[in-house]
Image: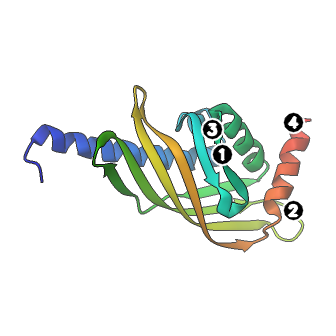
Amino acid sequence: MTTDIAARIQKLEDRTAISERVITYATSIDRGDWDAYADCFTNPVHIDFSEGGMPAADFDRDQFVGFAAVGLGGFTARQHISPNHVITFDENDSDRAVCSSYMYAQHYLEGAEGGEFYLMRGSYDNHMVRTEHGWKIERLVQHVSWLDGNTDAPAQAMERAQARIS
């Protein structure tokens, strides 16, 4: 353990900032605050939701945020809970870290055929980088442990969101 108080304080501040960014990722989805959501990411950002059916790829940040806004915006309500943050700093680069977090993503779609409730449980590996605008997610890997409820609800929600846009 280092005895340098300034370095220890910086690490504590970094842990708090990283954790807050990951929490903002979750809560901005629920509020539909797509600007705050976009602010969580670098540009470009690598997204790996392959366990949920979306192949891993590098995205322009705005393109990914637009995809999320349509994919999630059709739900009547959303609640994403992001607990159990374990933050590991890169030993060779103090401007990089990984925040492993749990994922509890509840989705409600009023009047959905097949049931109104859809739940995802799993975790994320949030690969973080310090930028001039704070810590950002530069690579996001989603791990799906199990699903519950109406697994067709995401497709129905997307149809509703696209109908509103048209």
- Label 3 vs 1, first from the N-terminus: 3
The answer for how far apart the CA atoms under marks 3 and 4 are is: 17 Å
CB contact under 8 Å: marks 3 and 2: no
Q: Which residue is mark 4?
A: 165
Residue pushed farthest left?
3
- Label 4 vs 1, first from the N-terminus: 1
Return the residue nearer the eye: 157 or 96: 96
Q: Secondary structure at mark 3?
A: loop
Q: Please tell me which residue is depicted at 9% across the width and 42% down the height of the picture.
A: 4
Q: Secondary structure at mark 1?
A: strand
Return the residue nearer the eye: 64 or 91: 91
- Label 3 vs 2, first from the N-terminus: 3
Q: Which residue is mark 1?
A: 57
Q: Quadrant of the C terminus?
A: top right
**Image: 27 above or below 154:** above
- Label 3 vs 4, first from the N-terminus: 3
Q: Secondary structure at mark 2?
A: loop
What mark, if any, has residue 33 been given in the picture? 3
Q: Where residue 118 sits in the image (x, y, percent)?
A: 73, 66
Q: Quadrant of the N terminus?
A: bottom left
